[in-house]
Amino acid sequence: MLVDDEPDVTMLFSMVLNARNGFDVHSFNDPLLALSNFKPDYYNLAILDIKMPKMSGFELYAEMKKKDSKIRACFITATDKILRV
C-alpha cells in the first residue's frame, strides 16, 4: 500500500514498483480512504508520506496497526527538515 497526498508521487512510485519490479501496488492520495480500504493480513508493506492533510503517516500507521499488528511501514517525506519521533 502506498499513501501520499501528491498524485505525482504515487504515480512515480507505482510505476517503479509495479512496472519495473513487479510489485502489486495499491496507491491512495487520501489517508482516510486508504484506511477504509486497508485489509488486515493483506499488505506486506505500507509506504506512507509523513505529512498529509487529514491524517499524518504516523497516525495512519497507528490506525493500521490496530487492524493488523504485523503491518510494516516505510515513511517518506519531501521536507528538508530533520523529523524527531
Image: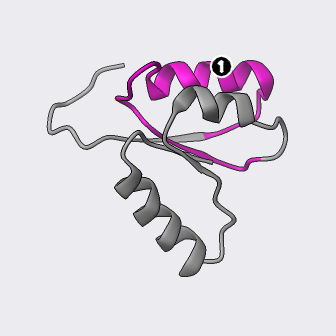
Q: Residue furthest bottom?
A: 20
Q: Residue furthest left?
A: 80
Name the kind of residue labelled 1 in the image. Glu
State yes or no: residue 14 in magenta.
no
Seen in the picture, residue 50 relative to 62 is either above or below; the reply is below
Q: Residue at x 56, y 24 (%)?
A: 60
Q: Secondary structure at mark 1?
A: helix
Q: Position of residue 8 (x, y in %)?
A: 35, 57
Q: Residue at x 69, y 65 (%)?
A: 24
Q: Position of residue 53 (x, y in %)?
A: 38, 23
Q: Which residue is mark 1?
A: 63
Seen in the picture, residue 22 relative to 12 is either above or below; the reply is below
Q: Position of residue 41 (x, y in %)?
A: 85, 40
Seen in the picture, residue 6 relative to 37 is either above or below; the reply is below
Seen in the picture, residue 52 relative to 24 is either above or below; the reply is above
- Give the residues in magenta: 43-72
- Asked which colour scheme the image uses, the reply is one colour
State which quarter of the image contains the C terminus: top left
State yes or no: residue 54 in magenta.
yes
- Other-residue count near label 1 (Cα within 10 Å), few / some / many at <14 / 14–19 / ≥20: some
Q: Residue at x 49, y 71 (%)?
A: 15
Q: Residue at x 79, y 29 (%)?
A: 68
